[in-house]
């Protein structure tokens, strides 16, 4: 049985359409320890992910992805030319982790954040908590199903 997650990406940085074109991608650049620990300790191959476009109007869930490679060192942390470079990261202590994801299905309709906030059936969802800024966060199965249903996909992929 898979776990369920939500992963945020800004559409001008890495949109859903790019994931579809690429076929899969490594989820690099996560520089929050709580999000890193989720990817390192909890995410496994086969887990399902709500792909969320953030920093746009309105922010929204656009599709469902799947974890296709488990946690491994984020090589961008050791690349001085990367925007995600961390001088404290080394090959002995990489500090930062990434996973790979692949697209599963685009939702027939995007699910805007205001619509999720208006749904009392999503009460308690981490995304909807005040000051929730984590780029990688857990979603319980019921909330995952509700969001997919709101996007016109009544059954999980």
Image: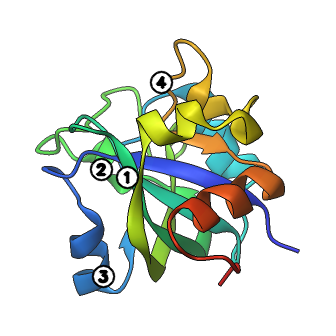
Asked whether disc 1 touches disc 2, contact meaning CB atoms under 8 Å apart, the reply is: yes
**Apparent side of residue 9 relative to residue 156 in the rendered image (left or right):** left
Residue that sits furthest to the top in the current view:
131
First in sequence: mark 4 vs mark 2: 2
Cα distance in 3D space between marks 4 and 2 = 22 Å
The residue singled out by tag 4 in the image is 133
Q: Nearer the viewer, mark 1 or mark 2?
A: 1
Q: Which mark is residue 76?
A: 2
Cα distance in 3D space between marks 2 and 3 = 22 Å
**Quadrant of the image for the C terminus?**
bottom right
Q: Position of residue 91 (x, y in %)?
A: 46, 49
First in sequence: mark 1 vs mark 4: 1
Q: Position of residue 109 (x, y in %)?
A: 39, 68
How busy is the neighbourhood of tag 2: few (under 14 within 10 Å), some, or many (20 plus)? many
Asked whether disc 2 touches disc 3, contact meaning CB atoms under 8 Å apart, the reply is: no
Q: Which mark is residue 20?
A: 3
Cα distance in 3D space between marks 1 and 3 = 17 Å
Q: Nearer the viewer, mark 4 or mark 2?
A: 4
First in sequence: mark 1 vs mark 3: 3
**Apparent side of residue 9 relative to residue 63 in the rendered image (left or right):** left
From what the image shows, is residue 23 above or below residue 83?
below
Q: Position of residue 140 (x, y in %)?
A: 79, 49
The residue singled out by tag 1 in the image is 28
From what the image shows, is residue 102 above or below residue 85?
below
Cα distance in 3D space between marks 1 and 2 = 7 Å
Q: Nearer the viewer, mark 1 or mark 4?
A: 4
Cα distance in 3D space between marks 4 and 3 = 25 Å
Q: Nearer the viewer, residue 124 or 38?
A: 124
């Amino acid at each position: 049985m898979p776990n369920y997650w939500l992963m945020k990406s800004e559409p001008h940085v890495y949109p859903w359409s790019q994931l579809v074109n690429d076929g899969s991608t490594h989820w690099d650049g996560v520089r929050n320890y709580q999000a890193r620990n989720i990817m390192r300790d909890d995410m496994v191959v086969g887990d399902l992910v709500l792909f969320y476009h953030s920093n746009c109007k309105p922010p929204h869930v656009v599709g469902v992805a799947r974890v296709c490679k488990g946690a491994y060192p984020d090589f961008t942390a050791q690349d001085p030319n990367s925007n995600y470079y961390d001088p404290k990261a080394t090959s002995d202590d990489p500090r930062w982790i990434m996973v790979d994801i692949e697209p599963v299905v685009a939702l027939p309709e995007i699910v805007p954040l205001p619509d999720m906030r208006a749904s009392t059936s999503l009460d308690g969802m981490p995304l909807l908590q005040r000051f929730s800024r984590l780029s990688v966060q857990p979603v319980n199965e019921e909330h995952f199903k509700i969001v997919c249903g709101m996007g016109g996909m009544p059954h999980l992929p």
